Amino acid sequence: MDSKTDRRKFLHHSLLMTAGIGLVPGAFATTKKVSANDRINVGLIGCRNMGFHGLRTALNTGEVNCLGICDVDQKVLAQRQSEIKEEFGQNPKTYGDFRKLLEDKEIDAVFVGTPDHWHCLPTIYACEAGKDVYVEKPLANTIHECNLMVAAARKHNRIVQVGQQQRSGKVWKAVMAYIHAGKLGKLRKVNIWANFRYGTGAEKQPDGPVPDGVDFDMWLGPAPKRSFNPTRFHGNWRHFWDYGGGLMTDWGVHLIDMGLWAGDVKEGPKEIMAFGDNLSYPDHSRETFDTMSVTYPMGDFVMNWEHTAGIQVGPYDMPYGVEFVGDNAVIVADRGDWSVKPEKAEDGAQVTLEAKQDFMEDGPGDLEAHVRNFIEAVRSRKQPNCPVETGRNVALYAHMGNIAVRSGAGRLLWDEGNLRFTNHEEANRFILPEYRDPWRLPVY
Ligand SMILES: NC(=O)c1ccc[n+]([C@@H]2O[C@H](COP(=O)([O-])OP(=O)(O)OC[C@H]3O[C@@H](n4cnc5c(N)ncnc54)[C@H](O)[C@@H]3O)[C@@H](O)[C@H]2O)c1
């Protein structure tokens, strides 16, 4: 057995043996408790785009103070700090190293809006510091990191909300209420599609100098060292395996999660079959697949995932959507609306179904509802709408689509008890990331 295999076996064994039991003492002092009327003190790690949307949404509720923001790009940091001052009259400290932000004992909770390869350590270190976490989706960039994050959240008894805001969205809640009330009849299939132009990446450009004010080594973090290229940086990183998983994980975790919710599935996948390739835009810079078809046999129903990056048309004239196929009807849904298409009876007469309006309530947008739900959970200590287990679960489905293709397996069988693929050894190589010095995967 080589040393790499040794290390993997050790980490794997540690995780199975110690998840939830406790191990490494936290490197940070524990944060104080939040009482029901206190404003919650928050920090933000990764400020450019979605992280800031989450923070701004929280600030808009009037229930939080922002004490600190952190980014490795000084320009982004300065811009976000001045926006927070202007819009909310608050003056957060700025940090270039998230570990320093986590040392502030006054901070109760953090938003993590870094690229996917940088979700695991900030989340785990925050849990160890006694802080609650709103971490963007997908939970992490590998299966093993997802497992560690669940173990850390549970060991340190933290609230972790994953940024799959559809779990708090009124359209999806109505769809689920309709399905779970039995209106759709037996759920037979969930067909999901996500066609987005951005999925082919940016036009190719040569490597170049690191932009002024960017700590690129810290941006890479645990990922392999390499020279700077703008087509792998801000926003574009999602098309490269070291940092993200392409449309399969970017949208996969939002939409596949709706199939899992509909089927009341709380476990990882058992079996998946996938095809993926890069068939378009050779002048664009990416590694992730522009074209994918994935099938998940779910026991008593089947889920199908389809994406075609670079184009933006799809079934029902919708670029993305979910079709829930039942014996009585088909529901078609996206974030904006849903419709019920009743099955015809044998004599051709339309089956009468209850009106979908009866299941729909008014309410805020998905992100606002999700952030409010996080704030409530921080106060009540009750599980949020998308706890870390739910984020982990769907991340496995999405990552396995990519792993099935990257490993050459095509079809994969997963053993949830042993956290391994049983039919293809090469695929197991993708479970555990190789962290670059000085970063280390925590042991849980
Ligand atoms: N929930 C949603 O609908 C949704 C939408 C978009 C993005 N996202 C998720 O949000 C995350 C961020 O995506 P984005 O589009 O905002 O990416 P982005 O590239 O626009 O922003 C990421 C920011 O993190 C910063 N950063 C990188 N490493 C850092 C580090 N070590 N410490 C501090 N800051 C660091 C970058 O400099 C950048 O400012 C991703 O996980 C993405 O999947 C979720």
Image (tube, grey):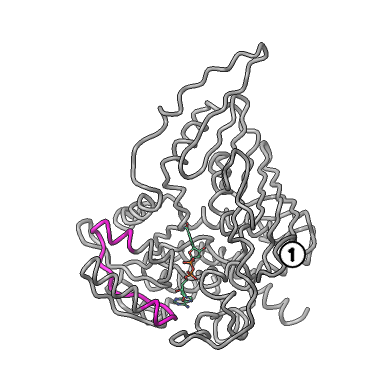
Q: Position of residue 139 (x, y in %)?
A: 52, 62
Q: Residue at x 55, y 75 (%)?
A: 233
Does residue 287 lie above or below 62 as drawn? below
414 to 192, vertically: above or below: below
Q: Is residue 345 above or below residue 342?
A: above
Q: Residue at x 62, y 73 (%)?
A: 242
Is 176 or 414 nearer to us in this picture?
176
The C terminus appears in which quarter of the rendering?
Answer: bottom right
Q: Residues within 10 Å of mark 1 (few under 14, many from 20)?
A: some
Residue picked out by circle 1: 406
Percent x, y of residue 2: 76, 81
Determine the residue positioned at 57% across, 27% down: 341
User: Is residue 181 found left or right of 351 in the rendered image?
Assistant: left
Q: Which quarter shows the N terminus? A: bottom right
What percent of the width, then of the height, locates residue 348? 65, 14
Question: In which quadrant of the rendered view does residue 299 lie?
Answer: top right
Q: Amino acid at mark 1?
A: Arg
In which quarter of the view is residue 75 placed? Answer: bottom left
Tag count: 1
Depth check: 339 or 242 in front?
Answer: 339
Label 1 SS: helix
Is residue 245 one of those drawn in magenta?
A: no
The residue stretch that appears in magenta: 56-77
Frontmost residue, 433 versus 237: 237
The spot of residue 234 in percent (x, y) is 51, 73
Asked if residue 59 lies in the magenta stretch, the reply is yes
